[in-house]
Image: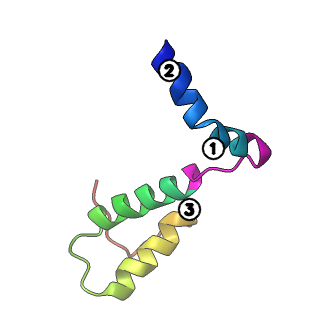
Amino acid sequence: MRDFAWMLRRHQQGMMNYFNMPIHNGTVEGLNNKAKVISHKAYGFRTPKNFICNLYHCMADLPLLKTMHTFA
């Protein structure tokens, strides 16, 4: 219990900063994870332009073209 109290005291300034300005990087981490998943699904695209086009479509939840090949 004593170690926990000292840990709270050491991190008190950081915790209080969160309440003063409640922002976090969860959204950015989520977008980064989504981009990585798209990157893994895009294995085999022949040009970087196709990969970037796929990123734009998936990140904005745009419908994919009917001529674009999809797996599963």
* Separation (CA) of disc 2 from disc 1: 16 Å
Which residue is drawn at the image coordinates 56% and 36% (left, top)?
Answer: 10
Which amino acid type corresponds to the residue marked 1 in the rendered image?
Gly
Residue 26 in magenta stretch: yes
In the foreground, 50 or 8: 8
Q: Nearer the viewer, mark 1 or mark 3?
A: 1
Whole-percent x and y of residue 1? 49, 12
Element assignment for label 1: helix
Whole-percent x and y of residue 55? 45, 72
Circle nearer the N terminus (1, 3): 1
Whole-percent x and y of residue 31? 50, 59
Residue 30 in magenta stretch: no
Return the residue at label 2. Answer: 4
Return the residue at label 3. Answer: 61
Element assignment for label 3: loop
Which amino acid type corresponds to the residue marked 3 in the rendered image?
Asp
Which amino acid type corresponds to the residue marked 2 in the rendered image?
Phe
Q: Which residues are magenta?
A: 19-27
Circle nearer the N terminus (2, 1): 2
Could one spot residue 65 in this view of the protein?
A: no
Is disc 1 in contact with disc 3, using a CB cutoff of under 8 Å? no
